[in-house]
Image (cartoon, rainbow, N blue to C red):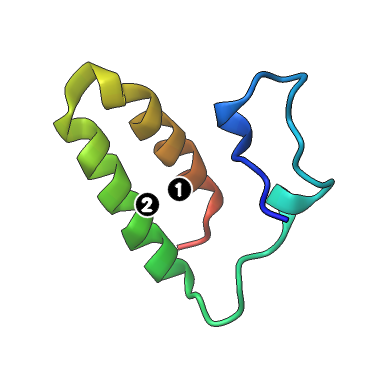
Amino acid sequence: MRHPHPASQGPLERTEPPGQYGLPPPPGVPPQQRHRALTAVAGIAATVGAVGRPVAEAVDRVLSLIPS
């Protein structure tokens, strides 16, 4: 069963199973690849200006958690 992303719902409507977003990344995905993908997302968010600012800030927070 596919669960909607929690950001698309209010706090009382979230339906993700416990631990879903705390799982480790799939095997074979090096941290550098995740870093590049998130950097690309941040670049797109920066391109759209103020609308993308929350996304860029969220990406920065996630990047700080990924070992380089």
Between 13 and 42, the one nearer to me in the picture = 13
Residue located beneath label 1 in the image: 63
Q: Is mark 2 on a helix, strand or loop?
A: helix
Q: Is residue 26 above or below residue 5?
A: below
Q: Residue 21 appears at what percent x and percent y?
A: 69, 49
Residue projecting furthest to the front = 1
Q: Residue 2 appears at what percent x and percent y?
A: 67, 53
Q: Considering the image in quadrants, where does the C terminus appear?
A: bottom left
Q: Rounded to the nearest whole Å, what is the CA distance between mark 2 and mark 1? A: 7 Å
Q: In this view, does 66 lie to the left or right of 38?
A: right
Q: Within 10 angstroms of label 2, few (less than 14), some, or many (20 or more) residues?
A: some
Does the residue at mark 2 contact the one at mark 1 (Cβ under 8 Å)? Answer: yes
**What amino acid is found at the position of numbered circle 2 in the picture?**
Leu
Residue located beneath label 2 in the image: 38
Q: In this view, does 35 lie above or below 26?
A: above
User: Which residue is depicted at the point 40% across and 68% down?
Assistant: 32
Q: To which quarter of the image does residue 26 belong?
A: bottom right
Q: In this view, does 45 lie to the left or right of 11?
A: left
